[in-house]
Image (tube, rainbow, N blue to C red):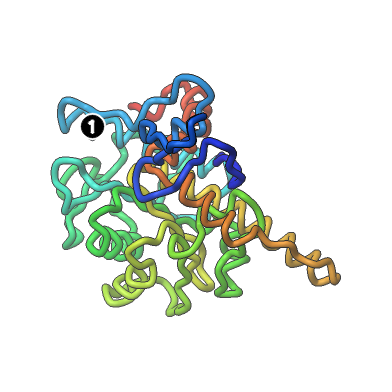
Amino acid sequence: MAPSAITTETEAIPINGPIHVKSTASHGHEVQKKPKTALEMISQGVALPGIPTFPSFGQHRQWMLEHMALAFRVFARKGYTEGMSGHISVRDPEHPHTFWTNPLGRHFGLLKASDMILVDYDGNAIGGNMSRPANAAGFLIHSAVHKARPDVIAACHTHSPAGKAWSTFARPLEMLNQDVTYFYGEAQAVYKEFGGVVFTAEEGERLAAALGPKGKGMILRNHGLLTVGTTVDEAMYLYTLMERSCEVQLMVEAAAANEVPKVYVPEESAKYTFEMASDPDALYWEGQPDMEYEEVMCNGAHKA
């Protein structure tokens, strides 16, 4: 997780991009050091590598689909399944106006890379597994998000229990602990409308507009949660984090109802932690423990 907001003589200054570190030399002059990334800040010793790169679209695509299948299996293990509800989308690396999604009616815990369907922005299945349809409501949600946010590579939405419970309040999560500060400020949104299952393009567009240009996670009133990321690993991790944060928020609300006072993360500390933790490479790595565990548990079945 992100370092503390408390700085020492060597001070980390969060910016949009790498973290620049400055220190004061003994003679009193400020010396500019090499910029540090979030991964370098969190790694004691040699830093973890960044997001993998690939020499061809085909290799990149296969890697994305395998990680997409693992993300679904993580969701299954954590109990986020609900009938045919729930979907993940991943923008194709070669054809960015298309995205991959899951087949309707197949359990998350059984999904493989070869199960995924490639659809275009008009809703046509144009590649991959076309033996089953995609989720129509899911298509409208994900296509609107991908159109509105070119920076979004992956989006996740399920009907997970704590997310559904907290969504009834149509309120953002409060900055109650270090972990939830990953959704600080504009990184968190609330969609305050609910018109039933999303079956119109207009509803999908309103939902995408509510997410905004900087949103990473959104609470959908009377519905559930939505998260996005620059990798499916990031979007998956942020979803698990948002779901757990909803669970914690509900626990805190129950205690607060008995007049136990809340103590919030200070504004400066929340902002600092968010800025230190929102790097795409760092958020990709936050997802790797669950991804690696799931790969071992399924003995590589997700690659088929």
Q: Quadrant of residue 217?
A: bottom left
* Left or right for 120, reference 261: left
* Left or right for 215, reference 146: right
User: Camera-side residue: 195 or 272?
Assistant: 272
Residue 103 spot, x, y in % from top left: 33, 48
Residue farthest to the front?
27
The quarter in which the N terminus is drawn is top right
Which residue is pictured at 17% across the width and 25% down the height?
55
Q: How many marks?
A: 1
Which residue is pictured at 68% across the width and 62% down the height?
264
> Few, some or many C-alpha atoms within 10 Å of disc 1 (few <14, some 14-19, many ≥20)?
some
Which residue is pictured at 33% across the width and 75% down the height?
206
The quarter in which the C terminus is drawn is top left
Residue 26 spot, x, y in % from top left: 51, 29
Which residue is pictured at 46% across the width and 50% down the height?
275
* Left or right for 263, reference 138: right
Is residue 81 in view from this perspective? no
Is residue 98 in view from this perspective? yes
User: Camera-side residue: 266 or 61?
Assistant: 266
Residue 283 spot, x, y in % from top left: 44, 41
Q: Is residue 51 above or below residue 269?
A: above
Q: Secondary structure at mark 1?
A: helix
Q: Amino acid at mark 1?
A: His
Q: Is residue 195 above or below residue 101?
A: below
User: Camera-side residue: 205 or 182?
Assistant: 182
What residue does disc 1 label? Answer: 60
Residue 50 spot, x, y in % from top left: 35, 30
